Amino acid sequence: MTWTGLFPGNPKGGVEGSLPFRFENFGTFAGPQNSSTNYDYDKMSIEGTWPESVPGDYAFKNVDLGAYLYNNETNYVGFHCDGVSTAQMYLQHSAGNIPIFNVLADVTNVTGNVNVVGNITATGDIKAIGDLKNEEFHGKDLKLKFNQSMFNNPENEPRLYGNKISSDKNFSKISKGIFTTCKKREKCPPWKIRAEEVEHDKNKKIINYKKAWLEIYDKPVVYFPKFFHPDPTVKRQSGFLIPSLNDSGNTGASLNLPYFKVLDINKDLTIQPRIFTNNNLMLQSEYRQVEKNLNHIMDVGMFTSMLNNNEESTKSHFFSNTLIDFDSTFFETSDLEINIEQVTNDTYLKKFKPKSSLIESENLMHSFFRYYGSEQNSSLEVSVESYEDLTKNSSDRYEYIYPNVEFNKEFGETNLPGSISLNSSLFQKQFDTNKTKQSLITDIIYTSDTSFNDIGLSNDFKLLFKNPNIREKTGSKNQSSTNTKLLTKLMYTMSYPLKKEGEFYNSFLKPKLSLRYSPNNTKNLSNEDRRLDISNISSINRLGISDGVEGGQSITTGLEYSFRDKIGEEKISLNLSQVLRDKANPDLPKNSTLNNKYSDIIGSVKFNLFDNLNFDYDFIADNNFNKINYNLLNATLTVNNFITSFQYLEERAYIGTKSYIKNQTKYSFDDSNSISFSTRENRELEMTEFYNLVYQYENDCLKAAIEYNKSFYSDDDIKPEEELLFTLTIVPFSKISSTNINK
C-alpha cells in the first residue's frame, strides 16, 4: 500500500515517504507520540506543553502512523492509525482549525460526524449511530485502549471494553464493562474486573466500578459493590489497595486493608489496618517524603488485643530513616543520616512479620546519628550508635558507641615509589553493662610499587605503623587501665607469574612467598574470634584487630592456578596458602591456627567449566591434609528446566561448631508452570529447620501458587507451625492469600 495525495492542492506537498501535507495548513494538531525530525511531539505530549499552533512537519513518515496520537486538551484532536491494516485515511471536514479524520480499517469502521477526544483510542468492531451528537458508540467488542502501559509495565495491555460507551471531555462511561491488563490471547484473560458500570473520570484520572466482580479465568472470585483505581496514566493516586488474607498458627487469621494516600507531589502515606479473627488489631503506617536534598521514610506499627487492655497486650515497632545531603566547606559531598529502630518485644518482628523496607534484621536493632563527608582522596565519618541484641544467647543486650570517628586519607604523588594511606579511628564503647572502652587508633600504611626483575619475578612490600591508645574501665570495681603503643609490621611479597598457552585455553600459575616481621607481640588475643580464609591471608593486618598486630616473624606460602578461555573468562581456579612460623605464639587466636608453628592450609576451588554446572569450595585443612576442619560449598546445577543449588557448611574442632545443609530446587514445566522446594538441615542440632514446597503458575498478569510450609522454629511465644497456603497475585495490583490449613 502506498500513500498518495490525500490533500490535493497542498502548495508545497511533502518529501518522499511522507504525507503530502503540512500540519500548519490545518491549524493545531497533537502529532505522533514518537518524535520526528522537525518537532518533538512526544515531549509535547508528556510535559503537556500544548502551544496554540504546532509547527509544520515535513518528516512525518508512514511508519509514524503506528504510534498513538492522543491528547488531553479539548482543542486537540487525536487519532490512531495502524499503517499495516488501515486501508484509507482522509480528511472528513474541519471544525474551525481542527481537522476531523475518518479512519477506514480492516477492523474499524467509523463514519459520520465523529469527534474522538481524550487520551484514548477507539478500536474494534465499532459502528457510528447517527451524528453521534451525544458521542455514543455501540458494538459487540467496543474497546478503550490506554496509550500508556499500566504502572509503567510494558508487559501489560490495559484496556476497557463493553457493549456501550458514552464519552465527553470529562467522563467515559461504559455499561457492562470489563477491565484487564492481560495481554490479548485466544482464550479469556487470566483475570478481569467485570462491572455493571465503569466510569473513567478524566479529570481525577481514576476508574470507578459499580457492582464489580474480580474474575479468574471467567470464574467470579471477589465481589466489590464499589471499587476504583487510578487510570494507567497516573503513577500515584490515593485509594484502597487490594486487601490480603493471611493466617498463622501463632497469630491467627487476619485481613489486611491497605490504603494509600498522596499527601503532596513528594509525600505519601500508606495505612494498613490488620484485623484478626480473635479480636486483635494491628495498625501499621509508612510515611515517605522526598526532597531535592532529603529522603525520609518512617514506619510505625502497633498490635493490641481488644479483649485485654493491660500493657502486655500492646506491642509496637518504630523505624525511621532520614538522609540529608548538603553542601560543605571541607568536602565535595556531605550527608547526614539519622536511623532509629525500636521494638517493644524480642519476638515481635518474628511473630507478626510487618513488611517494611527499613527492617533489615529480626534479631538486632541498630540506631545511629551519622555524618559522612568525602572527596577524591579522603573521607570523614562521625557517628553515635546503639545496638540492641534481641537473641537469647547474647552475653549482653545493649552496646553503645559515642562517639565513633573514622578518618581516611590517601596521599597522592610522593617522592617514594609507592603510595601512603592514613586511617585513624576514635571511639568510646560501653558494653557488658558496666564496661567502657576508649580508643584512638592510627594506621599509616606504605605500599610500594610492584617491580619485576629480568626473569619476571615480581616484588613489592608494605610497611604498617600502628599507634593504638586504649583505656578500659570497669564500673563495678572502679578499675581502669591505659595502654599506649607504637606497633610496626613489615611484609615483603614476591611471586613468579607463569603462563602456558593452549589451542583453546590458557593456563596461569603463580607461586607466592610473603615474609612478615613485627618486633611487637600483642598479648591476650587467644580468645578473639578471628579466622583465616583465602580473602584475608595475604593482607598485612589479616586478623583485622584494630588495636593489635600479629607479632614475630612468619612466612606465608601460596600457589594460585587458573584455567581461562581465550577471551580471559576464568573456568577453573585453585588457591592454596599456609603460614609457617619460627615458633608457636599462644597469644594469637586459636581458631585462626596462627598460634601454631604450622597453620592450617587455607584453600579455595572454583569450577565454572560448563555452563550448567558451577561450584565454589572453601576449605581449611590441617597441615598434613589428614582432616578438613572447615568446609563451605556452594554449588548450582542447571539442566534444561531444572535448577538446584546447595550450600554446605561444616566447622570442626577449634574452627567452630556450625553445621548445616541448604537446598533450593526448582523445575519449570513450561514458561508458566513451576514447582520449587527449599529446606535447611541443622546438623549441629540434628533437626530440620523448615520445609517449603511451592507450585506456581505465572503469566504476564497473574501469579497463582499453592504453598506448603513447615517451620520447626520456636522462641518464647513463637511455636512451630505447619501451613498450607493459596496465594493469588494480580499483576500489577496486589496479592490475595487464602487462610491457612493449620495442623
Image (cartoon, rainbow, N blue to C red):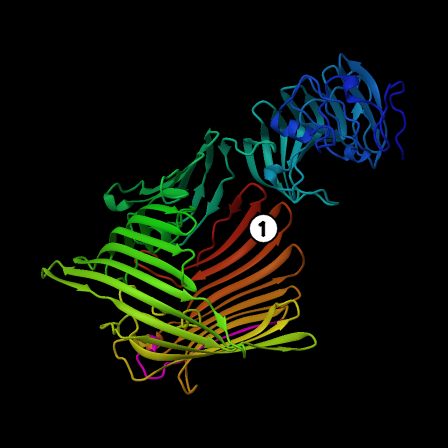
Quarter of the C terminus within the rendering: bottom left
Residue at x-position 63% and y-position 75%:
506
Residue at x-position 60% and y-position 32%:
233
347 falls in the magenta region:
no
The one nearer the camera, 53 or 69, is 53
Residue at x-position 32% and y-position 76%:
517
Q: Quadrant of residue 396?
A: bottom left
Q: Is residue 18 above or below residue 719?
A: above
Q: Quadrant of residue 392?
A: bottom left
Do we see residue 251 in this rendering? Answer: no
Left or right of residue 701, residue 64 in this image: right
Q: Residue furthest left?
A: 477
Secondary structure under tag 1 reads strand
Residue numbers of the magenta segment: 592-609
Do we see residue 721 in this rendering? Answer: yes
Counting from the top left corner in percent of width and height, residue 154 is at 65, 42
594 falls in the magenta region:
yes
Q: Residues within 10 Å of mark 1 (few under 14, many from 20)?
A: some
Counting from the top left corner in percent of width and height, residue 49 is at 62, 23
The one nearer the camera, 20 or 469, is 469
Quarter of the N terminus within the rendering: top right
The one nearer the camera, 292 or 320, is 292
